[in-house]
Image: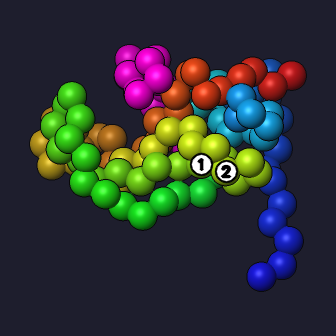
Amino acid sequence: MGLVYNVYISSERVYGCKTCKTHLADHDDIISKNFRGQHGKAYLFHSVVNVESSEAVERSMTTGKHIVRDIGCRQCKETVGWKYDTAYEESEKYKEGMFILEAELLCHVP
């Protein structure tokens, strides 16, 4: 299998895992802050790093049914959000392939 190396983001504002501080996303890559997760405020990102995905499941959300995968920190395995695989509603298709990170599960990494 080999060693797995974490990606380090070179940016002024980096979001990391609240538990272990592993880099997850660049603040400049936020698409929207107008989302809610299980723990409150959440952010929509086009891409994230250092995460592992679970199996895809169908989930009913406030905006309709979606097929999503929970994503966890690759370093400590804590769940930090989810990835949208499929949106059934035409108006929600823009989310496909994008990621939600929950603000409560993140920290700013210096």
Q: Residue furthest left?
A: 89
- Residue 43: in magenta span: yes
Kind of element beneath mark 2: loop
Q: Dominant secondary structure of the magenta stretch? A: strand
Q: Circles 1 and 2: CB distance less than 8 Å?
A: yes
Magenta segment, which residues? 31-47
State the image coordinates of residue 102 (x, y, percent, origin top left). Answer: 52, 28
Three-letter code, disc 2: Lys
Q: How dense is the environment of label 2, judged by Cα within 10 Å: few (below 14), some, or many (20 and up)?
A: some
Residue at 81 percent across and 53 percent down: it is 6
The reply to whether residue 18 is in sight is: yes
In the picture, measured across the screen, residue 65 lies left or right of residue 17, that is: left
Distance Cα–Cα, label 1 vs label 2 = 5 Å
State the image coordinates of residue 82 (x, y, percent, origin top left). Answer: 45, 44
Q: Quadrant of the N terminus?
A: bottom right
Residue at 52 percent across and 58 percent down: it is 53
The reply to whether residue 33 is in sight is: no
What residue did someone put label 1 on? 72
Three-letter code, disc 1: Gly
Kind of element beneath mark 1: strand
What residue did someone put label 2 on? 77
Above or below 109: residue 74? below
